[in-house]
Image (spheres, helix red, strand yellow):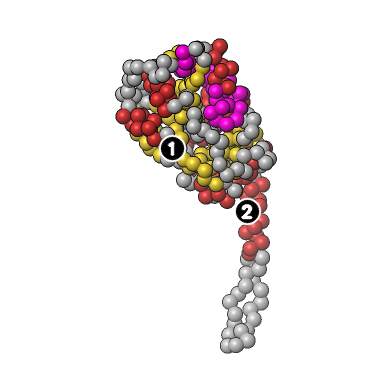
């Protein structure tokens, strides 16, 4: 490190402190070089096992099947470390009128290098001017706020080791039936009305991935609600759940949970308090209330009939 020649202070005639030459410039150069070491790439099919290992490393429980759906339904970005290993990811899912952002992960050994910021920027650039939703972790919230996201709601994340409910009666003359392939178009239409955007590609993949599906029909046989149960490495995820009211939503959840009474999880919009109380009585426990954030918009679409999201990543 070089030092400039020391000058005398004009007031006390003592040597001034040495001035380091070019220090700030070298720091900026180091940061730029660090960023250039990790160009943004697309996640490929062969990367999926690597992405699942990354998720396990940070304590998340993604499966290869889940990452397959992410890859096929959205734009999936990554940084690679030595040997091509995936060290960070983020994905954006473009729907008809808005998008959902998720799967933002960074290997602990590669944090504080700006990787998450760059990947989220890439996701935003993939859907310019479109409203973007995300469900934030507490650690990620400050980053999203810097990038223009604002909190517009919250979810209740509930988990159960074992479902202990059991509804005996049908509501409003409605009946629940196992979902089949002939129900797909009705499910997609119901989801669009409840979610606020059409996401046909995701729903077709999600229905194939689901181990359980239920459709709620009224007295005339018209589909008025549905729910899916998607298996994961540790928990079955119930969602999305679409229904005309909280009682009908409880009926659908009861049916899915009854078919697979092992460990399960559901993420419900926090305004559905009666449904949250019902789930608590049936063995669920609220473990987190993550914020729902939005960019290029100030409020969520009306969602009084959406009682559980598909996942925190998909919305």
Taking the spot 56% from the left edge, 41% from the top edge, the residue there is: 299
Task: State the SS at label 1.
Answer: loop
277 sits left or right of 125 in the view: left
Name the spot of residue 200 as percent of width and height, x first: 61, 23
* Residue 253 visible: no
Q: Which residue is mark 1?
A: 270
- Note whether 169 is above or below 264 in the view shown: above
User: Between marks 1 and 2, how big is the CA–CA gap?
Assistant: 41 Å
Task: State the SS at label 2.
Answer: helix
Taking the spot 52% from the left edge, 43% from the top edge, the residue there is: 152
- Note whether 63 is above or below 108 in the view shown: above
> Quick check: is 195 in the magenta stretch?
yes
Q: Which residues are magenta?
A: 190-219
**Dot 1: few (<14), some (14–19), or many (≥20) neighbours within 10 Å?**
some
Name the spot of residue 194 as percent of width and height, x first: 53, 28
Q: Identify the mark at residue 19; answer none if there is no mark.
A: none
Name the spot of residue 96 as percent of width and height, x first: 64, 30
155 sits left or right of 279 in the view: right
> Quick check: is 228 in the magenta stretch?
no
In the image, 197 versus 224, the foreground residue is: 224
Quadrant position of residue 203 = top right
Q: Which residue is mark 2?
A: 31
In the image, 118 versus 4, the foreground residue is: 118
């Amino acid at each position: 490190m070089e030092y400039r020649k020391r000058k005398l202070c004009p007031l006390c005639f003592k040597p001034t402190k040495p001035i380091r030459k070019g220090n700030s410039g070298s720091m900026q150069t180091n940061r730029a070089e660090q960023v250039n070491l990790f160009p943004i790439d697309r996640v490929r099919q062969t990367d999926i096992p690597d992405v699942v290992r990354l998720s396990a490393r940070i304590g998340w429980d993604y499966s290869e099947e889940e990452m397959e759906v992410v890859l096929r339904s959205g734009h999936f970005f990554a940084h690679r470390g030595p040997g091509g290993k995936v060290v960070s990811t983020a994905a954006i899912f473009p729907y008809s009128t808005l998008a959902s952002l998720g799967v933002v992960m960074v290997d602990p050994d590669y944090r504080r290098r700006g990787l998450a910021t760059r990947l989220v920027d890439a996701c935003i650039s993939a859907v310019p001017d479109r409203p973007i939703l995300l469900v934030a972790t507490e650690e990620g919230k400050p980053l999203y706020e810097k990038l223009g996201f604002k909190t517009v709601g919250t979810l209740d994340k509930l988990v159960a080791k074992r479902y202990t409910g059991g509804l005996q009666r049908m509501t409003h003359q409605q009946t629940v039936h196992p979902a089949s392939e002939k129900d797909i178009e009705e499910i997609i239409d119901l989801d669009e009305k409840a979610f606020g955007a059409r996401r046909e590609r995701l729903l077709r993949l999600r229905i194939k991935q689901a181990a359980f599906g239920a459709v709620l029909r009224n007295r005339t046989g018209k589909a008025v609600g549905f729910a899916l149960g998607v298996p994961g490495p540790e928990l079955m995820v119930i969602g999305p759940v679409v229904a005309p009211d909280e009682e009908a939503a409880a009926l659908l959840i009861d049916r899915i949970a009854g078919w697979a009474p092992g460990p399960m999880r559901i993420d419900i919009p926090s305004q559905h308090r009666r449904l949250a109380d019902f789930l608590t009585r049936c063995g669920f426990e609220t473990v987190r209330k993550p914020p729902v954030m939005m960019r290029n918009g100030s409020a969520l679409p009306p969602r009084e009939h959406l009682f559980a999201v598909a996942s925190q990543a998909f919305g």
